[in-house]
Image (cartoon, coloured by chain):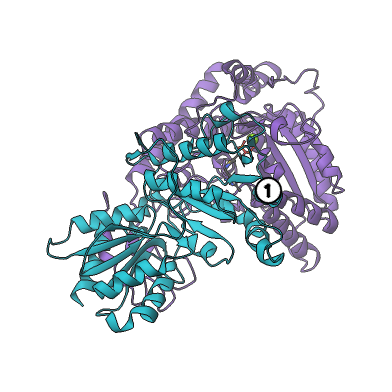
Chain colours: A purple, B cyan
Amino acid sequence: MTTATASKGRDRKTGASAMLPDDTLLGWLRDLVLIREFEIRTMQAYSNAQIGGFCHVYNGQEAVVVGTFAATIKDDPIITAYRDHGHALARGMDPKACMAEMFGKTTGCAKGKGGSMHMFDRPNNLFGGHGIVSAQTPLGAGLAFATKYENEVLGEGEKRISLCFLGDGALNQGALHEAMNLAGIFSLPVIYIVENNGYSMGTAIHRGTTMSDKLEAKAAAYGIESLTIEDGMDVCAIYDKFKPFADACRRDQKPGFVDLKTYRYQGHSMSDPQKYRSKDEVGSYQELDPILTLKGQLIEDRGCLTEEDFKAMQKEVRAIVREAVKFAENSPSPDPRTELYSDVFTDPLPNSSPSGPYTHGEANHLTRGDA
Amino acid sequence: MANLTLVQAINLALTQEMEADDSVVILGEDVGLNGGVFRVTEGLQQRFGDHRVVDTPLAESGIMGTAIGLAMNGIKSIPEIQFEGFLGPAYDQLVNHGARYRSRTRGAVTVPMTVRVPVGGGIHAPELHSDSPEAIYAHTPGLKVLMPSSPYDAKGMLISAIRDPDPCIFFEPKRIYRAFREEVPEDEYTVPIGKAKIVEEGSDLTVVTWGAMTIQCINAMDSLPEDLSVELIDLRTIYPLDVDTIVESVQKTGRCVVAHEAPLTAGLGAEISALVQERCFLHLEAPVQRVTGFDTFMPYYKMELDYLPEAPRVAEAITACAAY
Ligand SMILES: Cc1ncc(C[n+]2csc(CCOP(=O)(O)OP(=O)(O)O)c2C)c(N)n1
Ligand SMILES: [Mg+2]
């Protein structure tokens, strides 16, 4: 059984986050609260059967995206797996579009055709969630190849890094190892960030992954510099370690690997009996809660927040999230007669079902419960 | 006899084959402690130990290749791939290697492996968790492709697959995992590979289908006029095809409808209609009708039932074919 380790003895006065203005850290806190409140509503909507398919929530892991995104610029590509609501929100996706996507409505970020696992936000350079574990890791190398090519060959754009998130379970897919070798050999500016929550579905990391207490060894095998962040529930701790690391990858246009220890509070997906861990274990991590931690730092260390301010922030965010749910509820469902076949190619193909002579389309519409 | 769901029937077949033969080994992601994502292997690790029901790392290529390697050396491996979409990473090992060893070695090396894979739509899951890729694997020589439509068949077919000396892919239609129960004998029995089942006899028209679509076809037939006599064939084995049963039926009825969830183009419906026109040409009174999914990806759940050829669409195809 794993146990939580708190960040002790870290000097908050000298870390990179200490140099940042209060407003920036207050913004981080608001992002953490937004993701948390959003996921609470997501779970509710799922149990009300307003969200279908599979749904993996981010509660507990919020600090990962907030702390690492703070070291990026908007043009840096981001790519991740299916536990992607937090990435979408932290990257600036409208909570309405995110919620509507899960509700399968046309106002969703992918017109309600992707669902929970497929949050894409092209304007914000979020290249999506991915339902095949580790599929995103070679893609991340490709995104980094593109930004490097644009910058160095075409002379366009500034130096960028790509952040490629993956779970600890994804460490064991061949795709990642091919991708890391490629990134290493071509010096591609992609940072593989392992959101190490200790479990791949029901499999504890040490049961499925070699060198699980020394994951950096995997990066070393590919000549990639690495970093371990033990206190990954603490946004400031993440930022303090990640910011200089990311800056170096950006400056030298080279890859990186981060073992970022975090924890998910909920089951793997919405249907997980969680036989593989104890309530005490979950509780020990909840004591390190990212929201409570940052809130404490802002109240006690910086004195820039009061309990009342925090309550007001929560209230404001809750209103936004309620609004998002209402928006999703009231948005139209896609019309299958057009949306089922759109966007496979630029235009529908002639003579291919169902735009061609294939005609058994109408009867099915009778079976739809709602329009 | 017990009244079992498809999941329970599969679990029973696995239990009995493991009991009977020490060389049967199950491996896959979360198949042991968790009992599998659909709880199909529930209780097996407790019963047979973690050396026979093996929780693997998340690595489909590794799982498939290891299962093939085990089988090459005589262990009857049963890898579980959690959803059909995850066959992607395993494809090279299965298709480029596992399927080919008997041929490649002229019989010296064989692969008595059974790959279990949940398949198909109807459970509100997104793409890659709802697909029907059986045609891809039927197009691979050296692989036997099975898909049961009932608990009774599932038990008997799985036992046949496990005992078969060649690699089998056993697709389990998720939509009917727990949809209904059926009397399943306690004793071991087999349902032969390569033998279709005539679910209902008829004289006017033949419907060919398999897997969860069998239920949709039965529902469609219930909605048709009584004087239209439809013969329903559940293929059970998709490859090798039971050509004789299809041909005999269509020669009798002169009309044929094929129903499947997978997209139309290059689906198995194409293979079956080619076969029917080759072998039943002079008996045909109508073109073969295909009622299938569309040439697009399985949409997110709101449009799932618009994609799937549900009973009304099957009924429409049958009516059109009968009236031709
Ligand atoms: C190729 C593939 N295999 C299996 C799955 C099923 N699956 C989805 S998530 C998951 C566990 C992944 O764990 P991890 O990478 O640690 O991410 P986490 O869920 O902890 O965020 C599994 C086995 C899948 N989606 N894709
Ligand atoms: Mg994990």
Quarter of the image for the C terminus of chain B: give it.
Answer: bottom left
Point 24% across, 72% down: residue: B253
Quarter occupied by residue A241: top right
Local crowd at mark 1 within 10 Å, few (<14), some, or many (≥20)? some
Could one spot residue B200 in this view of the protein? yes
Of B184 and B63, the residue lying toward us = B184
- Whether ligand 1 has any atom under 8 Å from the Cβ at mark 1 is answered as no
Q: Which residue is mark 1?
A: B74
- B227 over A36 or under it: above or below: below
> In the rendered view, does B268 fall on the left or right side of B92?
left
How many marks on residues? 1
Q: Quadrant of residue A275?
A: top right
Q: Is residue A291 above or below residue B226?
A: above
Quadrant in the picture for residue A318: top left
Residue A299 point in image, percent of width and height: 64, 18
- Where does the image place residue A211, in percent across and percent down from the top left? 80, 34
* Ligand 2 in which quarter: top right
- Left or right: A254 in relation to A94: right
Q: Nearer the viewer, residue A323 or A307?
A: A323
B150 relative to B89 in the view: left or right: left
Coordinates of residue A104 in the picture (x, y in percent): 40, 49
Amino acid at circle 1: Gly
The x and y percentages for residue A234 are 69, 26
Indicate the chain on which mark 1 is placed.
B
Image quarter (top left, top right, bottom left or bottom right) of the N terminus of chain B? top left
In the depicted structure, whether residue A42 falls above or below residue A159: above
